[in-house]
Amino acid sequence: MDRRDFIRRSSLATATSCCSTLFSAWALASAPPKRILVLGGTFFLGPAFVEAAVAEGHTVTLFNRGITNPDLFPHLEKLRGFRSGDTGDQDFSPLAQRHFDVAVDVWPSDPTTVASAAEFLKDRVRHYLYVSSVAAYDSKEFTRAGIEENAPLAPWNGTGRKYNRGKAESERRLHRILRDKLTIVRPGPIKGNRDTTPDLLTWLVRAQNGGSHIGPGDGNDPVELVDVKDVARFLVFAIDRTLYGTFNLTGRAGTFREFLDACKAATRSEAQFVWIPQDFLHQHGLETDFTLRLFAGNFPLWRPVGAMPGLWQVSSEKAFRAGWQTRPFQETALDCLTCFRSRGQTLDWEDYLSPDKEKQVLDAWEHRSS
């Protein structure tokens, strides 16, 4: 073997090794392109999935009413119709003569709406994916950390939130209709690009503003977030690998102190968070967002462990073992800030906790009687 041939072969081997290292976990190059039908696909998780699927070479068709963000994805096929909780008031006619490798349902929690689409498509697709939620679990399960996919779901005829019961019942009906061609994912709170709930944004802006802010509790309460792009990438991963079954997608739990430190790091902030116990906050009129029934109140995403220690400690180990990878928090944070500010949403957003009230409570804590 002459020197030139040796260099050529060595370079090829090196390139092959690098590609294997980069792509082996996600099988980007090995999966053949598939025809994917997306039900909806134009609001939050839907666009993230479409972008991930298109990036990997799949052919994507959107089926929706053409009302929400109709200008998205101008080069993709769009079929107009509508779904309904009333099976007599829906239109799947554009799909009547079509067949796809995969269908992805990213939105509804109404069991009738979910089931009617599955009934219509069950003989027209080979693989069906549904985005559920960790909210589908029976609330009794949240008394412990580490909930896995085989935990009981909320009963349809129970007293829980309609959304929670609806997701759980949707799963049960899909299993009856689709049997072994079904993949279900259960994300926790999804954050990142196109997110319109300003909970993560609240903490990022407080960090960016610098100065002193309240850190609720002692910093040890758990929190779990998942990036919308990570959920989308797992769905594509499941399609590429023909991966069936149910998977929690919650990322990895951390402490609230770690979360706020990450917010500071992402915004290059020198803000100081002063940890104040829940009882003291309550005495000074600052309740948890759960008590206020708000998503972005005084302390978004903070849920003191209390009687539900498992709420922000759901296990995603099954997905990680399958090969799921997640983005660094900094990327999620920057996507969140970019999205809100580029769309002008921060102009209409105001922190629920006013600076004056926050300073009042910080001063009271500093001058409390020991």
Image: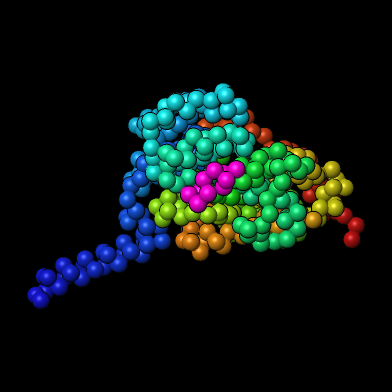
What residue is drawn where x is 12% and y is 70%? 5
Q: Quadrant of residue 98?
A: top left
- Quadrant housing the C terminus: bottom right
Farthest residue in the left direction?
2
Residue 184: in sight, yes or no? yes
What residue is drawn where x is 81% and y is 53%? 278
What residue is drawn where x is 61% and y is 29%? 85
- Quadrant housing the N terminus: bottom left
- Relative to 177, residue 9 above or below: below
Residue 140 horizontal/vertical position (percent): 75, 54
The residue segment tinted magenta is: 173-183
Residue 281 horizontal/vertical position (percent): 82, 49
**Which one is in front, 6 or 110?**
110
Q: Residue 148 in magenta?
A: no
Q: Quadrant of residue 103?
A: top left
Residue 319 horizontal/vertical position (percent): 52, 59
